[in-house]
Image (tube, rainbow, N blue to C red):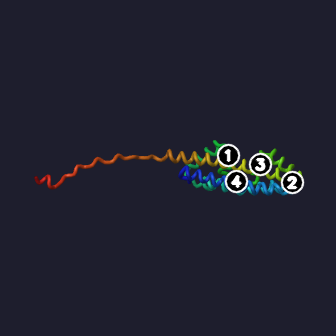
Amino acid sequence: MIETREELDAIKKSCHAMVTKSAGLSAGSAMIPIPGLDIGSDVAILMRLIPKINEKFGLSPEQIDGLDTESKLFVITAISNTGSKMAGKFITKKLIITLMNKMGVKIAAKGVSKFVPFVGSAVAGGISFTAMKVMGNSHIEDCYEIALAALEKEWQGLEIIIEPEPEPKPTIDPQDTLR
């Protein structure tokens, strides 16, 4: 479990770097003028990327199953409240394709633009890079929000008990009693 806000912020930053790298791979495959190659590679990239992000934030299905009942219920509720479609879920090809279909206009534009010589490949790469960044970064923000809510709940559950310092006991000097 993530223990500090600083740790959570570091995870978010490393996930953004993973998304940028994945978006670059997606753009590279989109520039190759072979129909369907870009969509297939985007699905493969997202099938690897999304579970890694979930795991880094402690939101993989296995990690959630390992929580105590109260924490598990809280995390599942937080996932539901964010509207996340990928946090805490087993990532399947069908799920990825469904989410990509919601970005259908961008994907269609990318596919058509590839057939315009030179400039079309660059446009397809740019669209692919942007679409991958949008999907990845959106998922990171959902995971961050869920993990932050869980972290804040954990902080609220900690009772800080400050005990007053005991009153110093008067010391008796043995010499005083003999006088």
Residue 12 image offset from top left, x and y in percent: 62, 51
Of callouts 1 and 2, the N-terminal one: 1
Any mark on residue 19, and which?
4
Label 4 sits on what residue type?
Val
- Write the residue at 47% across / 47% down: 158
Tag 2 residue = 118
Label 1 sits on what residue type?
Ser
Residue 68 image offset from top left, x and y in percent: 55, 52
- In the displayed structure image, the side of residue 157 where residue 43 appears, left or right: right
Q: Nearer the viewer, mark 3 or mark 2?
A: 2
Q: Nearer the viewer, mark 1 or mark 4?
A: 4
Tag 1 residue = 84
Tag 3 residue = 100
Of callouts 2 and 4, the N-terminal one: 4
Q: Nearer the viewer, mark 3 or mark 4?
A: 4
Q: Are marks 3 and 4 in contact (CB under 8 Å)?
A: no
